[in-house]
Amino acid sequence: MELLQLRYFYESAKSENFSKTATMFMVPTTSVSASIKRLEAELGCKLFDRTSNRIYLNARGRLLQKTLCSVFRDIDDVVEKLSIHDEDTRTIKILVRGMRRKITDFITEYNANHPHIAFKTVFNYDDDYQTYDIIIDDEKNFYDGYDSIELFNMRLKLKCSSNNRLCKQKLFLHQLCNQPFVLMDFESNMHKVLEKACNRVGFSPNISVVCNDIECYEKFIAADMGIGIARQEESPSGASSSISDLDVADFNEHYTIYAYYSKKEYYGNIKNFIEFLKSKSI
């Protein structure tokens, strides 16, 4: 009987799903299934009742699960105590899919007080999310093996050049159907919010510029190359006097950002950084 076998069983017992456990541990589903079958053979009893496409935890399985709950809690507590933050040398790997500037500010602030901690920060839409300890994204339901905290809940506004005649008018969203828009990225969460809002009133935004750099994005808006979207309270760096909010009566979008963190990596410096982010959440 091996500890990993028991881990596989414990996680599968919670979800009654071998595939979810396999995803969490980044192994084939067949490996999880075979490991649990070996565990059942060693114990001399079945822990799950199986049908053609489902597994169900049975009474013997529940008894083992209840015992392991206490065992793994004690093990995890010991691992945490042994993994003293100052001695944890793991690089914190972060996938940032939203709030790039704010997250960058948090990382630099944290690093000022913890200069020995290294970060690998990726600003893209990498689908291989399981290689990251922390993911910054809007609400998703497919980050298996991750817990989350809410970082930001914000009102969004449409932005334009202060020289644009529209910035002095009271508008409805459909009146912008012929206006150009500036976009950070077609895969960005902000684009999805904009596309959904525009589609709701009968049009798709006419994209004039696409870029993936926040400062360039703001310069394009300030130069009146199109309408952008950003947080209501945000004052674009170096362009605050050149960019204005549009007064669009039926654009009432909100945007929530979460920090997702890998449950199996949640100790030491990664847990410490998550606690730091919790202190910054608004």
Image (cartoon, rainbow, N blue to C red):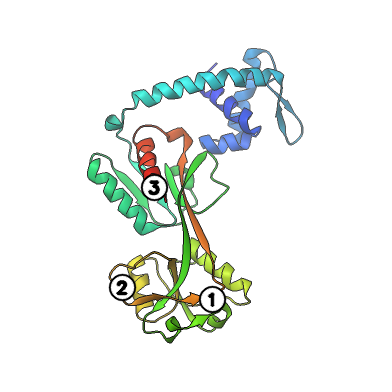
Q: Distance between the residues labelled 1 and 3?
A: 31 Å
In front of the other: label 2 or label 1?
2
Q: Which residue is drawn at 46% across and 20% down?
A: 74
> Pointer 3: what residue?
94
Look at the numbered disc 3 and give the secondary structure of its residue: strand
In front of the other: label 1 or label 3?
1
Mark 3 crowdedness (10 Å alpha carbons): few <14, some 14-19, many ≥20: many
Residue 87 image position (x, y, % from top left) = 28, 30
Look at the numbered disc 1 and give the secondary structure of its residue: loop
Q: Residue at x 35, y 80 (%)?
A: 223
Mark 2 crowdedness (10 Å alpha carbons): few <14, some 14-19, many ≥20: some
> Pointer 1: what residue?
205
Amino acid type at circle 2 is Ala
The answer to whether 4 is drawn above or below residue 131 in the figure is above
Q: Which residue is drawn at 31% across and 76% down?
A: 241
The answer to whether 19 is drawn above or below residue 191 in the figure is above
Would residue 149 be visible to someone looking at this image?
yes
Residue 49 image position (x, y, % from top left) = 73, 25
> Pointer 2: what residue?
239
Residue 243 occupies which quadrant of the picture? bottom left
